[in-house]
Image: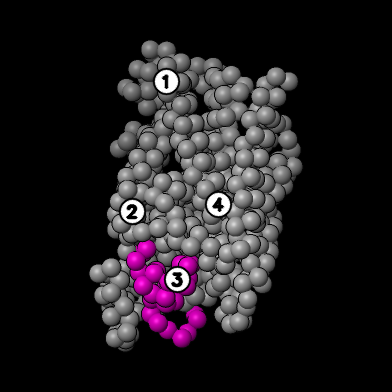
Amino acid sequence: MENRLGLYITFVFYIVSMFFIGIYFYRRAKTSGISNYFLGERQMNPWVTALSAQSSDMSAWLFMSLPGAAYLFGYQACWIAIGLAIGTYINWKVIARRLRNFSYAFSDSITIPQYLQERFKSNSKLIQLVCSIVILIFFTLYIASGFSAEAKLFSEVFGMQYHTGLFIGAAIIVSYTYLGGFHAVCWTEFFQGILMFFAIITVPIIVFFMMSESQVTQVFTKDFVWGTLFSSQHNNTAGEIISGLGWGLGYFGMPHILVRFMAIRSSDEIKRSRKIALTWVYLTLIAAVGIGIFGHAYLSSQGITYNSQLEAETVFMHLSTMLFPPWVAGILLSAILAAIMSTVSSQLLVLSSAMVNDIYHLYRKRSNERRSMILSRLAVILVAIIGLWIAMKPDNTIMGFVQHAVSGFGATFGPSILLSLVWKRLTETGVISGMIAGASSVMIWEGLNLYTATGYTSMVPCFVFSTAVVIIGSLCTKKPSQEVTECFDRAVNM
């Protein structure tokens, strides 16, 4: 009872704090417009931008899936962390400043679909419609992973039935996203990012000092049942290295991360945000892998073993409850809740913006601010219901959901976003063709389970295919108009 009391009080305190932030920004949103709800009127400071972008990216995947992969596959999981670290650096170094300037220069766009539409000054709405459909498909999977993770967390901590935890968790997330919009989401993610950082750094350090000298020696000199960094237990080292590194390509097409770059107060503040974000990411990725590897050694000595990804995704939760007092364990487990809430709320917001700003407004040119706000909030509820339906099966792994979604966004949007910022010759036809090619190739690859046949996940081959289609499609069509090229030059020189 004492253990549960400590956990309950910690969780309730955390959830109430998030609600206060949502209510505060709900009152602000009532007097502000749709731009404030979706983009915070481009007034995010460097700290909020950095921690919001990275905490909304990692989600429960950082606390559950990556440690679970490290537990099962050992040092091979480092390639995923390395790929994510490289992708984060390139995203902040190459894309962030330019996207902030380009989205502002091209009609002050507030969503990724709107930006790609305005990038070509086209009267056709096809590109905006294709973007929105892709966002609806892949973000719904991502949101389902968050709901599933939250249900498993509540089930593990409170002994709830999976479906009970699923509905309670969804209600919590939807409520404060519904209320506050972009400002509420970003500010809650700022505090959630701080909590996530200290929680994930603390656990592997304590586990390391709890291990015996022989266990420490074993971790650093042997591979147990795992592969080493350059050898795989599945005899497909090249495939696992390339597939692991390929996770970093997903960053170039993740709308909920890219929109943070668009929302920062000034492009001059990108450099400071980059330093904060990279420090956060590098340390948390190292810690997540450490949880899996150290956890494997320590739990094995306690007679505890996991034989599947589904089981291994609970390693952080088990270590937290085994090694820490109830109140501390409650804080650490609240970090998982923070990770889930930060990502799912961001994705719900992007999805609602796609449904209202990028689909509804295609057919209803005139819509007052009040109606748009109401529709945006109803869209949050609708998407949450779809995500709940997908997450109803408790035996789905978080890793599977996230990998599918990240591959879909990376291959669909990544090549088009990158080229839109650096290549003046890019055309609307090339972008539309590339996005369709990227999305369809990922769905085919995943649907036919070509990973089993080839040894490669869908990200790298589908990203390369999409890039080739964008380039060929652009070269085979008419050059952009003078207005577009002039606007491109103006954005580059901002």
Label 1 crowd (10 A; few <14 / some 14-19 / many >=20) = some
Q: Is residue 281 visible?
A: yes
Viewer-side residue, 159 vs 373 = 373
Circle 1 sits on which residue? 208
Q: Is residue 111 magenta?
A: yes
Choose the circle earlier in sequence order: 4 or 1. 4
* Residue found at x 57% / y 44%: 340
Viewer-side residue, 214 vs 199 = 199
**As shown in the figure, which amino acid type bears the numbered disc 4?**
Val
For residue 328, which quarter of the picture? Answer: top right
Choose the circle earlier in sequence order: 3 or 1. 3
Instruction: Identify the secondary structure beneath mark 3.
Output: loop
In whole angstroms, how far apart are the C-alphas of marks 2 and 1?
37 Å
Which quadrant is home to the N terminus?
top right
Circle 2 sits on which residue? 269
Choose the circle earlier in sequence order: 3 or 2. 3
**As shown in the figure, which amino acid type bears the numbered disc 1?**
Phe
Chain part drawn in magenta? 99-126
Q: Are marks 4 and 2 in contact (CB under 8 Å)?
A: no
Q: Is residue 54 visible?
A: no
Q: Give the left or right position of residue 64, taking residue 433 as reference.
A: right
**As shown in the figure, which amino acid type bears the numbered disc 3?**
Ser
Choose the circle earlier in sequence order: 2 or 1. 1
Circle 3 sits on which residue? 109
In whole angstroms, how far apart are the C-alphas of marks 3 and 2?
19 Å
Instruction: Identify the secondary structure beneath mark 4.
Output: helix
Q: Give the left or right position of residue 221, taking residue 171 as reference.
A: left
